[in-house]
Image (spheres, rainbow, N blue to C red):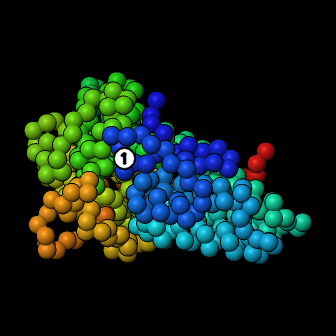
Amino acid sequence: MPVEAIRYSRGSLQILNQLLLPQQSCYEAVGSVQQAWEAIRAMKVRGAPAIALVGCLSLAVELHAGAGGPGLAQLVAFVRDRLSFLVTARPTAVNMAGAARDLADAASREAELAGATEEGVRERVICYAEDMLEKDLRDNRSIGDLGARHLLERAAPQGGRVTVLTHCNTGALATAGYGTALGVIRSLHKLGRLERAFCTETRPYNQGARLTAFELVHEQIPATLIADSMAATAMAHKGVSAVVVGADRVVANGDTANKVGTYQLAIAAKHHGIPFYVAAPSSSCDLRLKTGSEIVIEERPGQELTDINGFRVAAPGIGVWNPAFDVTPHDLITGGVITELGVFAPEELQAALSTAPFPQRDPKCS
C-alpha cells in the first residue's frame, strides 16, 4: 500500500508533515485555509496535485464548520477570496490556480439557481473538493498504466526489463495516493518489467532522498539513490532506459516547469539518446500560456540552500539564488507528455487536450 499524504473525511483534514520524513511519520490537522496556506508554503505538503487537493479540502472543512456568509453573495465572495489566497502560497504550480477558478465558478453557478440557499452552495463546494480527491487517484492510475505501456513500447519493444531515472518526488506523497512519474514506475514494477529505479537526491530540499526513497523502500521497489550531479554518469554507465519526471505546469507548446534540475536531466538524456518523459494530469496543463517564458518561477529562501536540518553548511556571507523550478523546452521532451488521457508529443498536446472529452467536474452529492 502506498503511503497516505492526505487523510480526509467530511469536516476533517490531516496531512502527513513531509518535512519530518523519513525520520518521523506525523499527521497534522488542517482546520482552516490559513493553516493550509502555511503548510503549503512551508512545504509540509508539496507536489502540484497535492497542493490543490489540500487547499480545496481546507476550504471544504471551513465551510462545513459554518464559515462564510451570511447571504449568498457574501458566501460566494468568501469562497472566491479564500481560494485566491491559497493560490499565492506557491504560484508556479498551476493545479491550485485552476482548481480555484473552477471551484469559485461552481459556487457562483449554484448561487444563481432559482431557490438557491447557503446550504446548497456550501454542499456544492464541499462535494466538488471531495470529487477532486477521488478523480486525482483515478487519473494517477491511468497515468501510471498508460505511461508504463508507452515506455515499454519505446524502450523495450523486444521485452525485458527497463531502468528508469526520476527526479524530485512525484508519488503518493505528491498526489492523492498513486503518483504521476512515480506512478509510472509503480506500474512498471507491478508488470514485472522494472529492473531498477534511480532517484536523484533533489537538492536543496532533498525530496528525492527523503520522500521518493522513502516511498520506494516502503513498497519494496528496487531502487538506487544518486546525487543530482551523478545523473549523466548514471545514464552513461548504468543502463538507464528512460527518464520520467513530473510537472508543476505544462504550457501550450509543451514547455514544462518542474523541480529545478529537470532541465539539465533533459539535456543529458538527449545527449545519451534516452527518451525523456513528463508525467502530469491534464490539470497541470495550462493552455492559456503559449511558452515556458511566461511561467512565473517561485524563488525560495536562501536558507534552504545554505542550511541542512537547521545547520549552516555554506560559508557566511555568500550570495544565494534559489529558484524552486526550471523550465524544460518542449523539444527536449523526446518521450512524450503522459496524461490520464494518453501520451502525447509536446506538439500534439494542445490539440489533444482542447478536443478531449473532459469529465464533468461539478457534481451534485447523491
Q: Residue at x 46, y 45 (%)?
A: 16
Instruction: Give the structural element (helix, strand or loop) at label 1.
Output: loop
Q: Is residue 258 above or below residue 279?
A: below
Count how many numbered circles sit on residues in the image: 1
Q: Is residue 160 visible?
A: yes
Based on the displayed image, in which of its 4 quarters is residue 293 positioned? bottom left
Question: Left of 324 or right of it: where is 96?
Answer: right
* Residue 139 can be seen in this image: no
Q: Residue placed at 44% from the left, 53% from the top?
A: 45
Residue marked by disc 1: 20
- Residue 83, image x and y in percent? 59, 68
Residue sitting farthest toward the right = 115
Report x, y in % for residue 165.
25, 42
Kindly identify the amino acid type of the residue bearing the numbered disc 1: Leu
Residue situated in front as seen by the camera: 362 or 128:
128
Q: Residues within 10 Å of mark 1 (few under 14, many from 20)?
A: some
| x and y, in percent, of residue 197 in the image | 26, 36
Q: Residue at x 13, y 52 (%)?
A: 229
The front one of 69 and 241 is 69
Please tell me which residue is depicted at 36% across the width and 47% down the height of the picture: 20
Question: With respect to residue 338, does 87 lie above or below?
Answer: below
Give the quadrant of the C terminus.
top right
The quarter holding residue 292 reads bottom left
Instruction: Please provide percent x and percent y for residue 226.
Output: 18, 43
- The quarter of the displayed image where residue 189 is located: top left
On screen, residue 125 versus residue 293, left or right, reads right
- Looking at the picture, does residue 121 appear above or below residue 146? below
Looking at this rendering, what residue extends furthest in the front direction? 311
Q: Nearer the viewer, residue 177 or 189?
A: 177
